[in-house]
Each structure stands twice: as C-alpha cells, then as structure tokens.
Amino acid sequence: VLDALDATFEKPADGVLLNMESNVERMTFKVSGEARDPGLVQGILSRLKTLGSVADAVLLGQEYQQSSSPRPVLFTLEFHMRDPS
C-alpha cells in the first residue's frame, strides 16, 4: 500500500509523504503529506480505493499554505485495511 501511495507522485516535486500513524487493532492508517496541487491529493485517494487490500479511504483535511513552497497543499488522509480473514 505504501508503495502505491508513493507511486502516485511521479516525481519528488509533485509530493511527499511526511508522516504515518497506525492503529493495528482497527486496521487504520493516517497519512499526512504535501502535494503540488489538490488534484494530486485526489489521485492518492483514487489510487487507494482501487487496491483490493484497502476497504475505504477518506480525506480528513487539506490546507493550502500561502508560501513559495513547491508543494503548497498540506493534506491528511485515512484508510482502513480489509480484514484478511
């Protein structure tokens, strides 16, 4: 799943994943990062939803920072893994 997330960004200037938190009991993962534009964030969600191992993926927040950063969109998303049993 993390490889698929990373592959969403074609080049480092498009985006970067900054942090990941997991709740193993709930099979939930929260990921934060930066992206060049909001469309790339939506691409991450779309990509996650196509993976058979992911039950659901939602955008928790997205913020546009007013700066000269090449990746001005901060985002946080959460996805739930399917129960393998």
Image (cartoon, rainbow, N blue to C red):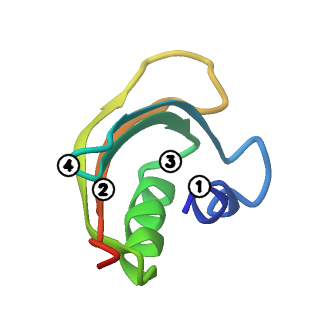
Q: Position of residue 64 (x, y in %)?
A: 37, 30
Identity, as a three-letter code, of the amino acid under mark 3: Asp
Neighbour class for label 3 at 10 Å: few (<14), some, many (≥20)? some
Mark with earlier residue (3, 4)? 4
Mark with earlier residue (2, 1)? 1
Say whether residue 12 is left or right of residue 37.
Answer: right
Alpha carbon of mark 4 to alpha carbon of mark 1: how far?
18 Å
Q: Position of residue 15 (x, y in %)?
A: 63, 43
Mark 4: which secondary structure?
A: loop
Identity, as a three-letter code, of the amino acid under mark 1: Leu
Nearest to viewer (mark 3 / mark 2) = 2
Mark drawn on residue 26 = 4
Nearest to viewer (mark 2 / mark 4) = 4
Labels 3 & 2 near each other (Cβ < 8 A): no
Q: Position of residue 60 (x, y in %)?
A: 21, 42
Residue drawn 30% across the image and 56% down it: 79
Mark drawn on residue 2 = 1
Neighbour class for label 2 at 10 Å: few (<14), some, many (≥20)? many
Mark 2, residue position: 79
Residue 15 against residue 56 in the figure, above or below: above
Alpha carbon of mark 3 to alpha carbon of mark 2: how far?
21 Å
